[in-house]
Amino acid sequence: MPLTVNRPARWSWRTLLPWIVGVVPLACGLAVMNWQIERELRAASQATARQVVEHVDHILDNLANAAQVLLPLAGSPCVDAQLALRSQVTRNAFVRSTNLFQHHNLYCSSLFGDFDEPVDAHDYTDGRLWLMNGNSVTPGHALLVYRASDGDRGAIITVDGDHLLTALRLIGPEEALQIRVGNAWMGKDGAVQDGVPPAAAAADVTLGSTRYPFSVHGGYEAGKQGELLRSHYPALLSLLLVLGVVAGGACRWQIRRASSPRAELRRALEADEFLPYFQPVVRKGDYRWAGAEVLMRWNHPREGLVRPDLFIPYAEHSGQIVAMTRALMLHTAQSLAPYTALLEDGFHIGINITADHCRDLSLLDDCQTFLQHFPPGRVRLTLELTERKLIEATPVALELFAKLHDMGVMIALDDFGTGQSSLNYLRQFKVDYLKIDQSFVAMIGGDALSQHILDSIIELSAKLGLGIVAEGVETEVQRDYLARSGVDFQQGYLFGRPMPASDFLKALAAQPGGARLPQGAPPEIMRG
């Protein structure tokens, strides 16, 4: 197998670690335990700080929204604005009081109506946020104040410090947490103090908000790491003493098993061994080629063509699928770009993506680079979502799909009807096409239940205004049934097997009424 090729041994921690684990299990175990506990504490501290930041961001989002609603009222008489001020307090669970100011003077409050108190923008960090140790109504009681201004007028929204205190105590009950705004900070005791918060004895972290001028400091008190060591030490020590020799062999086997596929895929990527194969997609009516799905094949120097199911799961597990897809898209564009005359306007090119592609916006650049190889409108790039990993509707993923649609890139759900998350994807993402899994197509004329499911999927796509592609069409009976059912596009061995670029271009040029290959095409294509 390509993914199990033996390689020369290299002296590294991967080689030495199994021997250390086997020869000195007790010493290694203590080191690993200390290291692991430290990592767990730091990871937990960072996660807790991140949750607190997100919670406070949510609170401040509510305050900012209320401030934007009230900002146009700043400068108007208090009697006219008072109802709106109190309305925001009533509707928003986080808002304690709302106020309006003009010319550095707070003149209207939801608590007292007409009011007179100076406002100093320098009290607010970044002119927006102030962690106060109480006011005239509740002295010594923490308050977080949000200020929004437009020139010399604006709105001031206050949230009770108890909301912050609840977040610190409930999200991190075992951690030392503080929230800091400017030169003021508050811990779990609810007291607002000036200066810099004390550093935690273990796993000290500081995480700042990207939207508001505050930060959260987290960590653990002294002795926490020793407490965890004492609670884990007896069981782990016994296990190391009994299984020391076995652990060395098992560790070596596991490391080789985990590292070998990654290294082999990295070598293949650097050697440009991943090639695009094209399977045509035909449109209903005349069954002319309206597009193609690009499938990745590995042209291994010793094994020849490797089936995708042998290396794609490894690539996704190791995170290398993104780089491999980027190389595949570039290879596809370079193979087709010289022969764009063979492609009808709007020719669909489908490429599979996974959850790994949706963790950042780099896919936008890959798609833009791909489309720049073709005249505008000649190619319609379609990204097909696979379900081997769940794609979560994170803000980054939603932004990615929105910008892809703005670029004219379409989204299809691959193997629809078989995955657990297909319906969720329809609800969360803007989808253009459904691809019916071949298992349903294969049952046409046979299994009645699967055929009913197929009909339901076709009906669902029509109601949602989505295009539909049927995969795995192998017989004329299947083709005709799908055509009668109004399926837009079909794909399968009946119309063409996956083929390399040269065979695909020859077959495309041979279609009735198709364009001819340009002069200067490679001989292996011209011979077709």
Image (cartoon, rainbow, N blue to C red):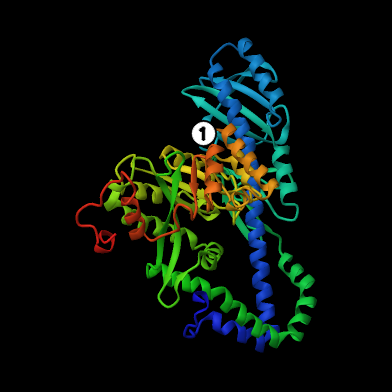
The percent position of residue 385, horizontal first and vertical second, equals 53, 49
Q: Is residue 285 left or right of residue 507?
A: right
Mark 1 burial class by Cα count in 10 Å: few <14, some 14-19, many 20+: some
Q: Which residue is at 65% across, 77% downward?
A: 31
Q: Is residue 19 visible?
A: yes
Could you say whether the residue bearing mark 1 is in a helix, strand or loop?
A: loop
The tally of labels here is 1
**Left or right: 240 in relation to 474:** right
Expressed as whole percent of the image width and height from the top left, the position of residue 237 reads: 76, 80
* Residue 338 in the image, given as x and y percentages of width and height: 27, 52
Q: Quadrant of residue 222?
A: bottom right
Compared to residue 390, the image places residue 300 above or below, namely below
Q: Give the position of the C terminus as an image quadrant.
A: bottom left
Q: Say which of 82 and 132 sits in front.
A: 82
Q: Quadrant of residue 241?
A: bottom right
At 40% across and 51% down in the image, what residue appears?
A: 366
Image location of residue 100, percent across then percent down:
59, 20
| Position above or below: 55 against 63 | below
Q: Is residue 135 left or right of residue 388?
A: right
Read off the residue under disc 1. 127
The answer to whether residue 210 of the structure is visible from this angle is: no
Q: Is residue 56 above or below residue 111?
A: below
> Looking at numbered disc 1 in the image, what kind of residue is underneath it?
Gly
Question: Quick one: which residue is furthest to the left in this view?
Answer: 519
